[in-house]
Image: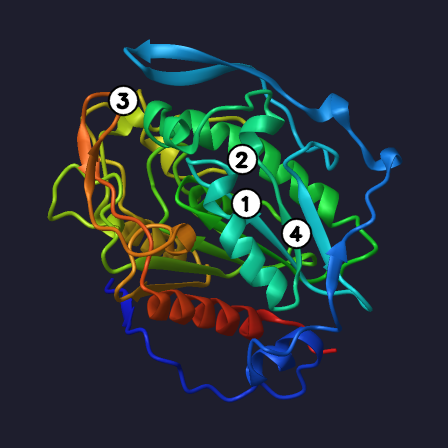
Amino acid sequence: MTPRFVRPRPPKRSCPPRLAGLLAAWCVGLGLLWTGVGALAQVTTSDCRPEARGQMQLVVLRGNFHTVQGQPGGFDPCEASVRYRVPAGGQAPLMISVHGGGGIADVRASDEAFHAAGMATLVFDAYAMQGLPGRTSLFWARSVSNEARQRMIYATALAAYDWARQRQDIDARQIYLFGVSNGAAVVANLAAVVDPTHVRGVIAEGITPIGLGLPDRIRVPVQLVFGRLDDFGSPDPAMLRWQLSDDCRLNVRVPRVPEGSAWRCNASTPGQRIPTALQWAQTVRDHGGRIEVVTIEDMAHNAYFGPLRQQRATWANGETYGASLGATQEARERFFQEMRAFIAAQALSR
């Protein structure tokens, strides 16, 4: 399967008929918001769930490279990293942004973009929610295994979705999930377990197939997005993100994660290769799932990281990998337009 390449120029799209509120505004342009200035939502002390927080500990695998163990937690809306905002004046669709290996810094800028466009937004730091605050993004990104990061992110993201769909201050029929990198793997797995009466679609940027694996079937549409310059995590300088693979022993089968590649490809099958993201997408399609693949020029890993930076780096496990990040401003805008179009295509008419 060949991804659809997109160059960073404004798309020519007509506005879907009879879309009101946010989606109609998006068809006109980002200058028009949903109903006015957004505000922090009303989360009271009665909403707090301190007992939902986890008690995880870092465990050394080798050198300065770690996994985690301990009691996983869920979601507490009163944890300090949580930012939940709804537009003033009406119920809006909600975007839950799920960070990648680097922690909440991965999605702060994209969260702002969704909020500025008029969506209700929810963002959180899953590591802090699991009882591990205070580490740098670079530590999480390079000194902790994929499966460990994804286990923590998945537990909190699933619980955050369960919390959000019960809210009365959003349109709980129109929840979307956005994830980047390890967070993209998490939201792809969530696409297999969420209730379609609440979740309209999932956007996965720079997904990795390594860690918890990826699901065989999905229940809601998925937009799979890659930067054309994304080599993040690739040991071979010629390998790009959608070609990324590794030995099956790096996948871990975890309870509550849906059936997928990690059920067949894990420590019990060493020497076999983890399916690439494009191979996974074809598996989903073979099972009747709706998934589109878009690749954007002049964009690397995590478009909202900042300006385009092409580089390689050495991880704490001693291996050197691609580490290109960010995007040009034009590519970032095009990426956002692609996400807008995907959301509009899934939206319910009012």
User: Please, what is the three-letter code of the amino acid marked with disc 3?
Assistant: Ala
- The residue that label 3 is drawn on is 316
Residue 46 in picture, x, y percent from top left: 88, 34
User: Please, what is the three-letter code of the amino acid marked with disc 2?
Assistant: Tyr
Residue 253 visible in this rendered orientation of the protein: no
The CA span between labels 3 and 4 is: 39 Å
Q: Nearer the viewer, mark 1 or mark 2?
A: 2
Question: Who comes first in sequence, dot 3 or dot 4?
Answer: 4
Whether 253 is drawn above or below 110: the answer is above
Residue 161 visible in this rendered orientation of the protein: yes
The CA span between labels 2 and 3 is: 23 Å
For the residue labelled by badge 3, is the local secondary structure a helix, a strand or a loop? Answer: loop
The residue that appears at 46% across and 17% down in the rendered structure is: 68
Q: Are marks 1 and 2 in contact (CB under 8 Å)?
A: yes
Q: Nearer the viewer, mark 2 or mark 4?
A: 2
Disc marking residue 154: 2
The residue that appears at 53% across and 48% down in the rendered structure is: 108
The residue that appears at 75% across and 34% down in the rendered structure is: 78
User: Please, what is the three-letter code of the amino acid marked with disc 4?
Assistant: Asp
Residue 206 in picture, x, y percent from top left: 35, 50
Whether 30 is drawn above or below 192: the answer is below
Question: Who comes first in sequence, dot 2 or dot 4?
Answer: 2
Q: Are marks 3 and 1 in contact (CB under 8 Å)?
A: no
Q: Counting other residues with Cα less than 10 Å from the Cα at mark 2, is it few (<14), some (14-19), or many (20 or more)? A: many
- The residue that label 1 is drawn on is 190
Disc marking residue 289: none
- The residue that label 4 is drawn on is 195
Residue 202 in picture, x, y percent from top left: 52, 56
